Amino acid sequence: MTRPFLDFPRDFVFGVATAAYQIEGAHDEGGRTPSIWDTFSHTPGKTWKGHTGDVACDHYHRYPKDIALMKELGIRAYRLSIAWPRMVPERGVKNQQGIDFYKHLLTALHEAEITPAVTLYHWDLPQWLDDLGGWLNRDVTEHFAEYAELVHRELGDLIPRVITHNEPWCSSFLGYALGVHAPGHTDWREAFTAAHHILLSHGRAVQAYRAAGGSGEVGITLNFTWIDPASTQPEDVAAAERVAGFSNRWFIQPVFSGTYPTDVAALVESRFGAMDFVKAGDLDVISTPVDFLGVNYYTRNVVAHQPNGDWLQVRHVAPPKEAQTEMGWEIHPESLYRLLHWIERNYTKGTPLYITENGAAFDDAVEDGAVHDVRRIDYVADHLAAAQRFIAEGGRLKGYYLWSLLDNYEWAFGYSKRFGIVHVDYETQARTVKDSARWYSGQIAHQHAAPTAE
Ligand code: FCB
């Protein structure tokens, strides 16, 4: 409450974000079949206390009330994702109940004057596709393009902004190399193969969307971690460049420049074998022009050279305790400012950017019907200030979607991390508006009261 509101251009979009598996629940209702996250979360030892998304925030049943709450808070933009296994529960089968669910949800949003942005893939690959090899099977790119077309055909009129993928870095590296996300594999060669197929499926989906006459905006969301070297020593600077190459350039460069970074590619090939999964013409498909880039930003990493360390030969330097969120991530808004400039200067060059996720987990508690999450207000206000500076310097940033509307299922961390501006009691499903939601609501009202159009 304490933080002053910020002035943004009149048409700047302020929204909130969620994802299907993290909030919907109803995992076996309405004709939905399992995704890789159902399989993974039900495998003993994979998630915190064995938590699953079976019920989550029960949004599948409670969406009318959740939308009413958004409206009450004055929220006018909402990023959500569609669960692929609700739409296509089996090979070649379209599920009318799933289509109807999203039709009703999207219609209700429009009626509440909340503009949806829809992510097609926020990590819930249908299990039947994983049984065919998942993202390791090149054919899955074809299935994804068909799914994108189906969403467009059935729901396109209701979706003005489409995001093909959320954070391919996580889907591929956390899922196929580090084993901490579904499908839980631990093989770097697989991870780079999956990453390539995910990017290829993005390009195919953009082409399918355009071919089908899609008139909305289409883009992709990438996650970025700003990387700083631990010292000015040349070996630490080089270590930081390697990690930045792996974390950031590996995805943005193919999408915007149609090439993989040669320095990282050389490392990958020397460690994990020839990148023969890249076929002629793939990079042209991957770099099909998009209407925007979604930027997810939470933190930065500080890294040092470490011989005989992991394959990147680096070690991470832990941030000071007082600068960490509940995830252990460093709070560093300045790096958002630097990142936006770096992205625009080197890659997007004027293609609009949206911050499609930014937010923080803190150990919130409800006291007398309130949650005084002052640190979250500071986090959001400081990151908005960084975004505002970028815009003031001519940066093409058109919106900000706060992660997240609700506390929700934080993947392998289960329900132990709370990112919401609305608190969820998982026993009762009661929603409690946190102070951060009231502050954000004030920021949005301030925005809409702005006198002049820019
Ligand atoms: C991002 C994910 C999102 C959420 C936040 C905290 O990596 O896209 O689903 O889990 O982190």
Image (spheres, helix red, strand yellow):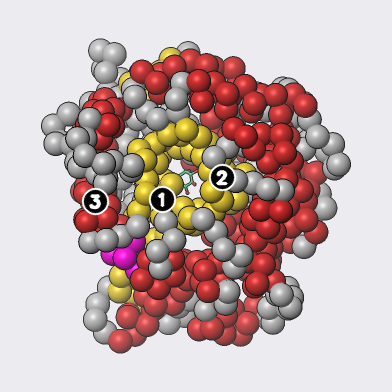
Q: Residue furthest right?
A: 92
Q: Which residue is mark 1?
A: 354
Residue 441 lies in the magenta-colored region: no
Q: From the image, give the main secondary structure of the stretch colored magenta.
A: helix
Which of discs 1 and 2 lies nearer the camera? The answer is: 2
- Structural distance between the alpha carbons of marks 3 and 2: 26 Å
Look at the picture and state if 255 lies above or below 112: below
Q: Which residue is mark 2?
A: 216
Depth check, front residue: 370 or 154? 154
Q: How many marks?
A: 3
Q: Residue at x 33, y 43 (%)?
A: 12
**Tag on residue 388?**
3
Depth check, front residue: 369 or 46? 369
- Structural distance between the alpha carbons of marks 1 and 3: 13 Å
Depth check, front residue: 347 or 321? 347
Some atom of ligand 1 lies within 8 Å of the CB belonging to the residue at label 3: no
- Structural distance between the alpha carbons of marks 1 and 2: 15 Å
Residue 369 visible to the viewer: yes
Position of residue 175 measured from the top left corner of the image (x, y, whole percent): 61, 55
Q: Earlier in the sequence, mark 1 or mark 3?
A: 1
| Location of residue 201 by image quarter | bottom right
Quadrant placement of the N terminus: top left
In what element is the residue under mark 3?
A: helix
Relative horizontal placement of residue 190, taking residue 258 as reference (left or right):
right
Position of residue 71 measured from the top left corner of the image (x, y, whole percent): 40, 21
Give the magenta part as a residue range: 337-342
